[in-house]
């Protein structure tokens, strides 16, 4: 009885030793470390600059990916904003400019939704503010301010974010045209001014009156 008990104890001890050899004590920490590395592929970079470059690369949209209904690339979005800003001149309410900018703006929002940390978004937001601020409609002026605010907060450390922080500090004036009234009609009272963010001013422009066609004379 005693010999069988001793043999059993030796066998149990050998099994424990085998298990201890097969499963290292730090297996859990290695697994956690490997998982953390796989989630953050840039953590292995040795310098801060290398990690930043790695993060920017992983957060960027591929150059051959397209956004919005017109399937614009990020270069197509930027080119549209830049070209229409030139075409708008000092200001515009041209439907052609508004429609083209609208499609590019839709593509920009799609891009930002799918790649919210893409560092190239800052340049596109800045180009969008340049053209939207020249479109004298209430919607375009509101969108221009929204993009300025995004740049000044989410991309505050970038070159374009610093520009918009300065512009907002100086004050931003929204411009849009009021509805035109027929020539000779009594002037209508000004509509109540909308609530504006702090530091934002409003200038409503009154367009020329609309000439009413004379009634055709009967033969």
Image (cartoon, rainbow, N blue to C red):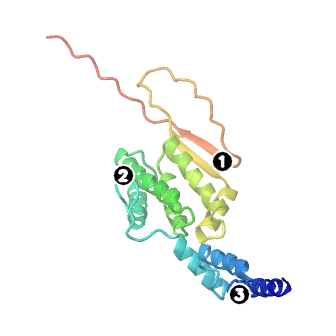
Mark 2, residues whose alpha carbon is within 10 Å: few (<14), some, or many (≥20)? few
In front of the other: 161 or 13: 13
Residue 69 circle label? 2
Instruction: Report which residue position mark 3 lands on.
Output: 18
Residue at horizontal 38 percent and vertical 62 percent from the top: 66
- Spot occupied by residue 144 in the image (x, y as percentages of width and height): 54, 52
In the rendered image, which quarter is residue 213 located in?
top left
Compare marks 3 and 2 and give the one earlier in the sequence: 3
* Residue sitting at the far top: 218
Residue 129 circle label? none
Q: CA distance from mark 3 to mark 2?
A: 63 Å
Instruction: Report which residue position mark 1 lands on.
Output: 200
* Quadrant into which the N terminus falls: bottom right
Mark 1, residues whose alpha carbon is within 10 Å: few (<14), some, or many (≥20)? some
Q: Is residue 159 above or below residue 100?
A: below
- Spot occupied by residue 204 in the image (x, y as percentages of width and height): 55, 39
Mark 3, residues whose alpha carbon is within 10 Å: few (<14), some, or many (≥20)? few
* Residue sitting at the far right: 2
Residue at horizontal 81 percent and vertical 84 percent from the top: 9
Compare marks 1 and 3 and give the one earlier in the sequence: 3
- Spot occupied by residue 164 in the image (x, y as percentages of width and height): 62, 61
Q: Is residue 109 left or right of residue 51?
A: left
Compare marks 1 and 2 and give the one earlier in the sequence: 2
Select label 1 or label 2 by which is in front. 2
**Secondary structure of the residue carrying numbered label 3:** helix
- Spot occupied by residue 47 in the image (x, y as percentages of width and height): 66, 87
Q: CA distance from mark 1 to mark 3?
A: 74 Å
Q: CA distance from mark 1 to mark 2?
A: 33 Å
**Secondary structure of the residue carrying numbered label 1:** strand
In front of the other: 52 or 120: 52
């Amino acid at each position: 009885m005693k010999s069988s008990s001793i043999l059993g104890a030796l066998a149990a001890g050998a099994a424990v030793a085998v298990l201890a050899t097969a499963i290292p004590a730090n297996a859990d920490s290695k697994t956690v470390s490997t998982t953390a590395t796989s989630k953050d592929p840039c953590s292995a970079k040795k310098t801060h600059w290398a990690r930043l470059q790695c993060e920017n690369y992983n957060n960027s949209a591929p150059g051959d990916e397209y956004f919005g209904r017109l399937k614009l690339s990020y270069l197509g979005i930027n080119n549209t904003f830049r070209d229409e800003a030139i075409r708008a001149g000092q200001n515009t309410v041209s439907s052609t400019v508004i429609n083209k900018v609208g499609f590019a703006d839709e593509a920009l929002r799609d891009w930002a939704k799918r790649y919210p940390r893409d560092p190239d978004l800052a340049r596109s937001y800045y180009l969008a503010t340049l053209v939207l601020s020249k479109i004298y409609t209430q919607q375009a002026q509101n969108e221009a301010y929204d993009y300025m605010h995004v740049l000044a907060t989410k991309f505050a450390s970038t070159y374009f974010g610093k520009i918009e922080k300065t512009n907002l500090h100086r004050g931003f004036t929204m411009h849009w045209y009021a509805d035109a009234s027929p020539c000779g009609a009594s002037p209508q009272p000004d509509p109540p001014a909308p609530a504006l963010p702090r530091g934002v001013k409003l200038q409503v422009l009154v367009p020329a009156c609309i000439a009413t066609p004379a009634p055709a004379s009967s033969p």
